[in-house]
Amino acid sequence: MSQIDQPEPRWQVILALLAVAGIYMALPRELVVGPTWLLPLMVVVLLIPTVFAHRTGRHSLNHVLGIVIGALITVGLIASVVLLVITIPGRKEPPLALLRAGGSLWLTNVLVFALWYWRLDGGGPRARETKHEFGSRSFVFPQMQIEKMERKTFGVDRWRPGFVDYLFVAFTTSSTFGPTDAPILTHWAKLFTMIQILISLTIMVLLISRAVGVL
């Protein structure tokens, strides 16, 4: 069976969601809206029917629940960044604690938007599996830039992106504040990328300015 015909493994996505929940619980209390355990609990509770819907073939329900989880963790991320903006000027956190909090939010930003790209590209993972299409609808990955006659030589003639590919896009976007090796095609992906860059840039500017203030 070729790579493009194989169902995409979901354990990487589940691991990313659990990582987001764990990072959120480890954030300083002043960067969390409501009880620290509330958002991670909601993610875990919603993750159970999401996995069940996927296993039982209820793909529309799985897609909707995935979007709901994505919306929840995005709201939690933005709220924490806003609280960071509000609280950081008047506080005297130790540099290590400040770096840890900023790094946690930066990593959460990467994971959250990697999940969005994976969830929405081409109609979602189930749609990509059903259509058996080559490549991506929203991003131009390096594999898609290889000449058609040479794709078989490189073993990518029947290739489509998986979660790790979207994770790499999200990581490089947050690191360089812009797309790198995967140009963006669709409006929704450009909008989400701008939001991700804005969040990442805000975190980095706050950390740098605070570090200068400490020095």
Image (spheres, rainbow, N blue to C red):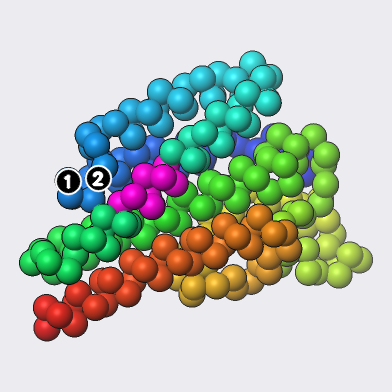
Amino acid type of the residue tagged 2 in the rendering? Val
Q: Crowding near pointer 1: few (<14 within 10 Å), some, many (20+)?
A: few
Q: Report the residue marked by disc 1.
A: 29
Indicate whether 77 appears above or below 39: below
Q: Is residue 125 left or right of residue 79?
A: right
Q: Name the side, left or right, on which 37 lies relative to 97.
A: right
Going 33% across and 34% down the picture, which residue do you hit? 39
Q: Work out which residue is located at the far right of the displayed protein and give it.
A: 149
Circle 2 crowding by C-alpha within 10 Å: few under 14, some 14–19, many from 20: many
Where residue 113 sits: x, y (%)?
51, 53
Residue toward you, 183 or 89:
89
Q: Which residue does the image show at 86% across and 70% down from the upper left?
A: 147
Extreme-top residue of the structure? 56
Give the residues drawn in magenta, as a range: 73-80
Q: Which residue occupies the foreground of this view, 162 or 45?
A: 45
Front position in the image: 156 or 125: 125
* Quadrant hosting residue 90: bottom left
The residue identified by callout 2 is 32
Main SS, magenta residues:
helix
| Contact check, label 2 and label 1, Cβ < 8 Å | yes
Q: What is the x, y in percent for residue 199?
A: 42, 63
